[in-house]
Image (cartoon, grey):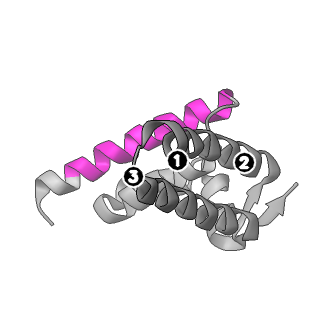
């Protein structure tokens, strides 16, 4: 792996951590998906940052719940699906003029929805 690619992943990891932090305070942003993305970036680029995130007293639980129990909070499910469908719906029906692209966007949304709903719900 090149150093540039590694540093790009570390940078993205911290951006996703920042978005996850914002998601903890803003009801529009989901926390767990951003932290999972951060963990994936760190896992591929820095053991130090990956371990820091997994052992963080606040954020570590989001990732551990997903990895160990394949579970997400009800709030996380609702916010994730709501934001996703708002963005994808707007894109598919208003921002894209190609019907095939719109259909693909909707099909991807249905697949992600099925995955999120298949996860256990933490109360």
Looking at the rendered structure, the secondary structure element under dot 2 is helix
User: If the image is split into quadrants, where does the N terminus sit?
Assistant: bottom left
> Label 2, label 1: how many angstroms apart (C-alpha)?
11 Å
Residue bearing the label numbered 1:
34
Residue bearing the label numbered 2:
76
Q: Position of residue 28 (x, y in %)?
A: 65, 32
Looking at the rendered structure, the secondary structure element under dot 3 is helix
71 inside magenta stretch: no
Residue at x 57%, y 34% (from the top left corner): 21
Front one among 75 and 60: 75
Label 1 crowd (10 A; few <14 / some 14-19 / many >=20): many
Image mark for residue 58: none
Among the two numbered marks 1 and 3 on one chain, the one whose residue lies closer to the N terminus: 1
- Residue 27 seen by the camera: yes
**Above or below — where is 35 with respect to 19?**
below
Which span of residues is magenta-colored? 7-26
Q: Position of residue 6 (x, y in %)?
A: 21, 56
Residue at x 67%, y 54% (from the top left corner): 61
Residue sitting farthest toward the right: 123
Among the two numbered marks 2 and 1 on one chain, the one whose residue lies closer to the N terminus: 1
């Amino acid at each position: 792996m090149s150093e540039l690619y590694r540093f790009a992943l570390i940078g993205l990891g911290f951006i996703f951590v920042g978005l996850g932090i914002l998601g903890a305070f803003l009801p529009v942003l989901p926390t767990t998906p951003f932290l999972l993305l951060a963990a994936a970036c760190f896992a591929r680029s820095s053991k130090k940052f990956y371990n820091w995130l997994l052992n963080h007293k606040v954020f570590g639980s989001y990732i551990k719940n997903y990895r160990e129990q394949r579970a997400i909070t009800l709030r996380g499910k609702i916010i994730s699906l709501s934001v996703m469908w708002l963005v994808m719906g707007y894109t598919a029906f208003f921002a894209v003029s190609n019907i095939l692209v719109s259909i693909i966007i909707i099909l991807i949304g249905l697949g992600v929805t099925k995955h999120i709903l298949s996860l256990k719900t933490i109360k």
